Image (cartoon, rainbow, N blue to C red):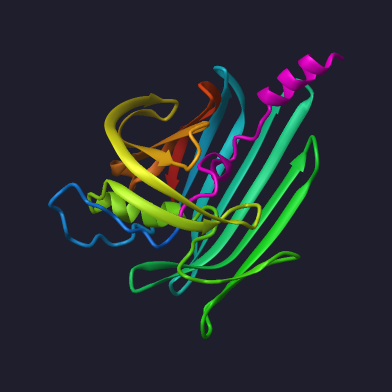
Amino acid sequence: MSKNYQNLVMQATKPFALGALLAASLSVAAQANPSTENTDSAELPLHPYKATYTAYKWGDDVGEANIELSKLGDQQYSLIYTSKVSKFFLSDKRSEHSIFTVNDNTVVPSEYYYNRSGTGPDKELKVTFSHQGQGKIAVENGETFDWNGEFDNQIYRIDLAKQLAEGKTSLEYHFVNYRGELRHYGVQVVDEEVLSLPFGKIETVKVKLIRDSNKRETFAWFAPSLNYTLVRLQQFKEGDEQGDIKLKSFETQ
């Protein structure tokens, strides 16, 4: 097999993980610059649900992703993301599991687990958030950081739903990504669109992920009628589409 062909195949099977695409997602210190007059504080829309997505690469169906939110106990929740994609003879399987609590309408991370398997090196990660005293973030077999309100790699979506419901249009998030690194991104509302998805036609709010680098562009669409659940995610790198994930089904539990 030629090296060029192998590189092409590898590009076709790059992971479609929602957490990876929205990348090192965003954090709880959401400092919003509202462009609306809506100043009412929205309640966190923590209704247990399961959402299933179809993953596309260059228009081809290459796999599936799932997000499931469930309640574990009094103010304690679980958010699980899984994905499995394949193209040609290569495959990528990922999972992210966040355990968090809600205190005074604020999302507080407790534990985060990441697992990746398939073609190429396997990867596992555990991050523990301690809120005693000054607060610490402990990355298993890695660094320890002071905790200053950072999220893990995926539970930003819970806070983001609340911020969008309040009419916020410009947000900043700090978080620990799936590599165990501290990162920072911005989120900017750019439009309102009606999308035709495998799920059906639905009204959405479109946001753009703001990074320090301009090499990658990530767009996400959230549906107000589904408590601002993520319904589409699309990423480009240097103008080429890397992946497109679209909502296929949504069930409340």
Q: Residue at x 32, y 58 (%)?
A: 31
Left or right: residue 133 compared with residue 201: right
> x and y percent of residue 22 in the render?
50, 42
Left or right: residue 186 compared with residue 181: left
Above or below — where is 154 with respect to 8? below
Above or below — where is 105 with respect to 47? below
Above or below — where is 84 with respect to 79? above
Count of residue discs: 0
Residue 216 in view of the camera: yes
Left or right: residue 217 compared with residue 204: right
Residue situated in front as seen by the camera: 146 or 234: 146
> x and y percent of residue 203 in the render?
28, 33
- Picture quadrant where residue 89 is located: top right
Residue situated in front as seen by the camera: 168 or 247: 168
**Highlighted range, magenta:** 1-26
Q: Name the quarter where the N terminus is drawn.
A: top right
Magenta-span inclusion, residue 24: yes
Residue situated in front as seen by the camera: 124 or 26: 26
> x and y percent of residue 3 in the render?
82, 18
Q: Residue at x 52, y 32 (%)?
A: 216
- Picture quadrant where residue 240 is located: top right
Q: Residue at x 76, y 65 (%)?
A: 141
Q: Residue furthest bottom?
A: 133
> x and y percent of residue 218 in the render?
46, 34
Above or below — where is 148 with respect to 174? below
Residue 253 in view of the camera: no
Q: Residue furthest right?
A: 1
Q: Residue at x 53, y 31 (%)?
A: 215
Magenta-span inclusion, residue 108: no
Q: Residue furthest left?
A: 37
